[in-house]
Amino acid sequence: MRIAIEREEFTLNYQPLFDNHNSIISAEALIRWQHPTKGWISPADFIPLAEETGLIIYLGEWVLREACRQLKQWESTSFFQLPLIAVNVSPKQFRQSNFVSQVKQILAEFEVHPERLVIELTEGIVIADVDDTVKKMNALQSLGIRIAIDDFGTGYSSLTYLNTLPIDVLKIDQSFVRDINNDNNTAIVGTIISMAKHLGLKVIAEGVETEGELKYLMSAGCRMFQGYLFGKPLSADLFAKFHITNQQKKITANCLISAQ
Ligand code: C2E
Ligand code: MG
Ligand code: MG
């Protein structure tokens, strides 16, 4: 894997996150590995391996650096400003003693304001070592970095952490969104949205694929979305084109409304 980084076999794809006004509010950086003989390998297959071998430390740092570099490059060459960039951080990476200083240094290196970075953590990471988590999350928050809980609802979590930790966003796992017509999932999704609202947290629905799912999510009060219905993960170049097309569509729609 270390060699694969040197050979530049890893790339990042970017998936747009939308608000209810059809604006792109963020992009999630998702890693891809183009193996010379095996072709594309899914992160679901190699991230656990990278965790086991410890190479995630190396890979995770590369992801953070590449996402920040790309954010700045879009600004200088594509003339759009993406408000936020989200990066997934895995347990071993988060547990490194120098994790916070590493993030701080990368942000400074690329002159990315900390408030533009969202770090996605899973519930498992959050509750594994509470003292270390509290310390690191507070340090990240004091820098201005935002924290999202990814795949929310799938971990064995104690909900008390929602009250005590500086969390900004809950991302409802796609398994609940996908089967939204199932009564249990409707109840789970509705409950997560209303709980987030009461706790003052933002909520994003992951894996939104159909108009029906979107309609229900909207009716339940969700205002931020990620999923194939809105846009698939794209290479950096295609993401830039997608973003510009979306901006143009919005301008056209606004002109049509004001001309009426
Ligand atoms: P995740 O962070 O929950 O990312 C969302 C996953 O859902 C992505 O899969 C994305 O392609 C997929 N997805 C998005 N919208 C839809 C949809 O509408 N329908 C369906 N069926 N899928 C959708 P991907 O890229 O294969 O990543 C899988 C997981 O691998 C990620 O889940 C994340 O946990 C991990 N991962 C990806 N990149 C990184 C990385 O740079 N670092 C770390 N530590 N983990 C990563
Ligand atoms: Mg994620
Ligand atoms: Mg997720």
Image (cartoon, rainbow, N blue to C red):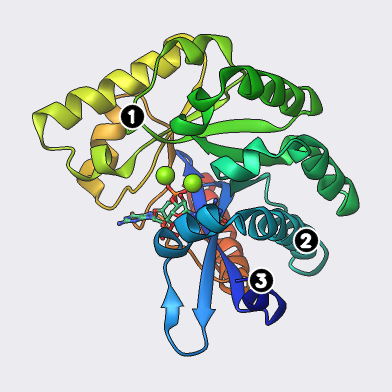
> Which amino acid, mark 2?
Arg
Q: Foreground residue, 39 or 190?
A: 39
Instruction: Report which residue position mark 2 lands on.
Output: 69
The image shows residue 18 at horizontal and vertical percentages of 49, 45
Relative to 99, 252 lies left or right: left
The image shows residue 159 at horizontal and vertical percentages of 41, 14
In terms of image quadrants, where is residue 238? bottom right
> Which amino acid, mark 1?
Gly
Instruction: Report which residue position mark 1 lands on.
Output: 153
Q: CA distance from mark 1 to mark 2?
A: 32 Å
> Which amino acid, mark 3?
Arg
Q: Nearer the viewer, mark 2 or mark 3?
A: 3
Instruction: Report which residue position mark 3 lands on.
Output: 2
Q: From this viewpoint, which residue is outermost toward the bottom?
A: 37
Query: Which quadrant of the figure contains the N terminus?
Result: bottom right
Badge 2 local density, few (<14 within 10 Å), some, or many (20+)? some
Residue at 66% in and 58% down = 63
Q: Earlier in the sequence, mark 2 or mark 3?
A: 3
